[in-house]
Image (cartoon, rainbow, N blue to C red):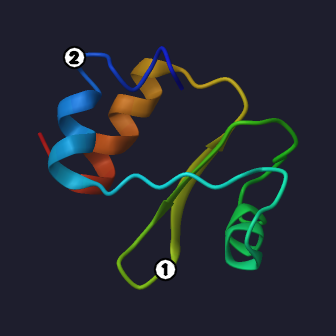
């Protein structure tokens, strides 16, 4: 994620439409574990979970993140064009 988040096609979308939170993978909260169960084949860190304002799972990724797919997902979820 370190190489994805600062990208000019990603950072503005995150800043304008999302609240980013981090959880410790070694001491994860129960709610985060339950949300991660929504990811198919979630076997590799990092996990990126998109959750709505009510805490419901919307989308997510596991493992290596493709920056173009990540930006596309941000646009789709946020309704940005």
Element under disc 2: loop
| Left or right position of 67 against 32 | left
| Left or right position of 17 against 73 | left
Q: Which mark is residue 77?
A: none
Residue 50 in the image, given as x and y percentages of width and height: 48, 58
Quadrant containing the C terminus is top left
Quadrant containing the N terminus is top right
| Left or right position of 42 against 73 | right
* Picture quadrant where residue 57 is located: bottom right
* Picture quadrant where residue 70 is located: top left
Residue 38 in the image, given as x and y percentages of width and height: 71, 65
Residue 53 in the image, given as x and y percentages of width and height: 35, 78
Element under disc 1: loop
Identify the residue at horizontal 41%, vertical 85% (top origin): 54
Q: As rendered, which of 6 and 24 lies closer to the eye?
A: 24
Identify the residue at horizontal 32%, vertical 54% (top origin): 77
**Residue highlighted by disc 1:** 55
Figure disc tally: 2
- Looking at the picture, does residue 33 appear above or below residue 45? below
Identify the residue at horizontal 51%, vertical 79% (top origin): 56
| Lower sequence index among marks 2 and 1 | 2
Which class describes the residues within 10 Å of circle 2: few (<14), some (14-19), or many (20+)? few
Spatial CA distance of label 2 from label 1 is 28 Å
Q: Tell whether label 1 touches label 2 (CB within 8 Å).
A: no
| Left or right position of 10 against 46 | left
**Residue highlighted by disc 2:** 8
* Picture quadrant where residue 9 is located: top left
Which class describes the residues within 10 Å of circle 1: few (<14), some (14-19), or many (20+)? few
- Looking at the picture, does residue 33 appear above or below residue 81? below
């Amino acid at each position: 994620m370190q190489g994805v988040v600062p990208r000019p096609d990603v950072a503005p979308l995150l800043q304008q439409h999302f609240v980013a939170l981090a959880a410790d993978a070694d001491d994860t909260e129960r709610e985060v574990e339950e949300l991660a169960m929504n990811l198919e084949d979630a076997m590799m860190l990092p996990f990126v979970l998109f959750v709505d304002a009510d805490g419901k799972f919307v989308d997510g990724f596991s493992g290596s993140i493709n920056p173009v797919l990540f930006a596309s997902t941000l646009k789709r979820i946020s309704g940005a064009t």
